[in-house]
Amino acid sequence: MELPLAWCAAESVVELSSPPAGINMVVGGDTNNGFARGECRWLYQLIALFITLISKAFIPATNPLTHPLLINMHLKIAFTSFQRRALISIIPILFFSLLQAQKIDYCPYFYLDISTREENGESVKSYSPEIDTSHQDSLSTFFGQHYNRFSYLLWNKLGDLGPIAETYPDTAIMDSLFCDLLHNNSLFLFYLNNVLPESFRLPGSTPETFTTDEMMLVASHFFYCLEIQQSDTVIISHICVSIKDQETIPFKRDMTLLEAFAFEGIFNALQNEEKSKIDANFRRYINESTNRYKDRMNSLEELLVTVRHECFALMEDDEDLKQSLLQYYRDNRDNLNFIID
């Protein structure tokens, strides 16, 4: 795409470093106009000041575009171009700035953590994607406030981290590969973009619409009956374990955004609601279902599967869970780029 700038002509071209892909800045034309002679210097000063204010107002502080050196470069181009008789339009600079405003470098915030332990005389290595919330900026603060949704996406949607972890103890290569994965996994970046506040979100991100029934279907599968004890038929259960480690759910479309939301919303209810009934309801459903079927099943495994599926259905219809999640959605509507209808 070409942006003709003949109205702001010059005798030579002033190049900006790394213009946005697909944009060619064309400078040329009559050098005898008032702009080239410096008669409108006040206008350039005003526009340059406007760029600075726009950059600080709309571009996240974490974005390298807000670095003082880059802003100063823009101002220097504007203020010295008259002496050099080489003018470049301020408009493509502003356009470039706004295009880049939402391109977040996630590498300082997400990292791959490696730990080792001794097991049967051998060193066993384990790894996990983690979030660094220690940075003093608004994005880091948001990651800390909504840790669970991002942790869910890192664990379940980033991809196979095993090959990257195998490069340890060469942490330089490991960190570089992990950073590349963050930058190049477009689907993962899509998910991230849609669970961020609008100020960090890519422009033109159209929100998807989910139904309340879909929300409950997704949420119910975070209440998982894991195993059954042979001695007393007590069922061991977990809340908010990874969906990918469970039975395949026949979703008709991608429910990842709902998964991350429900994962966080359930944690919020269990940790912050004073009289949350969700956990108590789940345990009651397990006990009632176990008592209902334990004398009718041919094996403990059959009993476990039966109770597990019935609890899925019961949690899917649980009114306390439904109201808790809907309230959490209302409280976070401004940082979730999807609609629950």
Image (cartoon, rainbow, N blue to C red):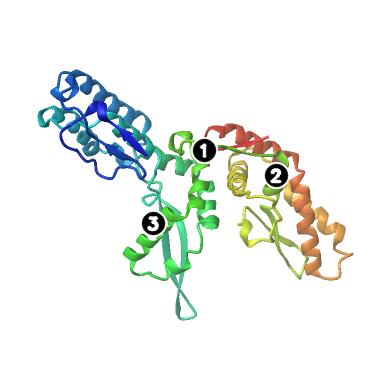
- Relative to residue 224, is residue 80 drawn left or right? left
- Relative to residue 37, is residue 1 drawn left or right? right
Residue placed furthest toward the right: 296
Q: Earlier in the sequence, mark 1 or mark 3?
A: 3
Which residue is label 3 attached to?
Answer: 179
Residue placed furthest toward the left: 83
Asked if residue 176 is positioned above or below residue 280 in the image, the reply reads below
Residue 122 x, y percent position in the rendering: 45, 79
Asked if residue 253 is positioned above or below residue 75 in the image, the reply reads below
Question: How many numbered dots are placed on residues in this image?
Answer: 3
Which residue is label 1 attached to?
Answer: 205
Instruction: Tell me the CA gap for discs 1 and 3.
Output: 24 Å
Residue at position x 20%, y 36% in the image = 73
Q: Earlier in the sequence, mark 2 or mark 3?
A: 3
Residue 103 x, y percent position in the rendering: 39, 43
Q: Secondary structure beneath disc 3?
A: helix
